[in-house]
Amino acid sequence: ALQRTFSIIKPDATKRNLTGKINALIEDAGLRIIAQKRIHMTKAQAETFYGVHRERPFFNDLVSFMISGPVVVQVLEGEDAIAKYRTVMGATNPANADEGTIRKLFAESIEANSVHGSDAPETAAEEIAYFFAGLELVG
Ligand code: CMP
């Protein structure tokens, strides 16, 4: 079914001017970028966004990394967009990512892994609503 997912191009990627190359991989996979903006997250925004990971040992480092530079937040639309984008991204740890995926091509580490994508329909809806107003989504 036609679905929407939430994406972040992370600071390691924006720093290296990879936004366009990542967007090309997204669009080549048949996903449509129906909303996009470049922001610099505050600590509070990053902590809330990654709230489910609050108890994990990597939480503080992850928040510091996510506010270390600008990010590009996006809404992607397409057939099975959530699973499709996870395939395009590749495994969380770039060492385990398949050839041709964003993380295999560009990620520096499990933390600086270039992109985020929602893992399920409920989280996609929450994550989209956290960063975008309905009127900003132009399908
Ligand atoms: P993301 O999909 O944005 O969701 C949580 C992020 O935590 C993950 O990508 C990684 O960037 C980061 N992270 C850092 N260390 C780990 C780890 N050991 N396991 C999972 N995620 C990690």
Image: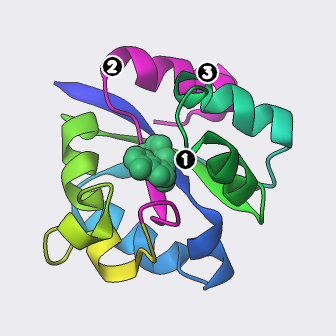
Look at the numbered discs 2 and 3 and tell me whether their residues touch, using CB distance below 8 Å.
no
- Secondary structure category for the residue under label 2: helix
Q: Quadrant of the N terminus?
A: top left
Q: Earlier in the sequence, mark 1 or mark 2?
A: 1
Circle 1 Cα neighbour tier, 10 Å, few/some/many (<14 / 14–19 / ≥20): many
User: For this view, does 91 lie left or right of residue 132?
Assistant: left
Q: Which amino acid, by three-letter code, is at mark 1?
A: Gln
- Secondary structure category for the residue under label 1: strand
User: For this view, does 117 lie left or right of residue 65?
Assistant: left
User: What residue does disc 2 label?
Assistant: 121
Q: Earlier in the sequence, mark 3 or mark 1?
A: 1
Q: Which amino acid, by three-letter code, is at mark 2?
A: Pro
Residue toward you, 109 or 76: 109
Residue toward you, 64 or 126: 64
- Front disc: 1 or 2: 2
Question: Does the magenta-highlighted stretch encompass residue 95?
Answer: no
* Residue 37 visible, this angle: no
The structure residue drawn at horizontal position 47% and vertical position 19%, both measured from the top left corner, is 125
Distance CA(mark 3)–CA(mark 1): 11 Å
Distance CA(mark 1)–CA(mark 2): 15 Å
Q: Quadrant of residue 22?
A: bottom left
* Residue 23 visible, this angle: yes
User: What residue does disc 3 label?
Assistant: 129
The structure residue drawn at horizontal position 61% and vertical position 40%, both measured from the top left corner, is 59
Mark 3: C-beta under 8 Å from nearest atom of ligand 1: no
Question: Does the magenta-highlighted stretch encompass residue 118?
Answer: yes
Q: Given the current orientation, which residue lies at the most extreme front position?
A: 57
Q: Which residues are magenta?
A: 110-139
Circle 2 Cα neighbour tier, 10 Å, few/some/many (<14 / 14–19 / ≥20): some
Tell me where residue 133 appears, x and y as whole percent: 70, 24
- Secondary structure category for the residue under label 3: helix
Mark 2: C-beta under 8 Å from nearest atom of ligand 1: no
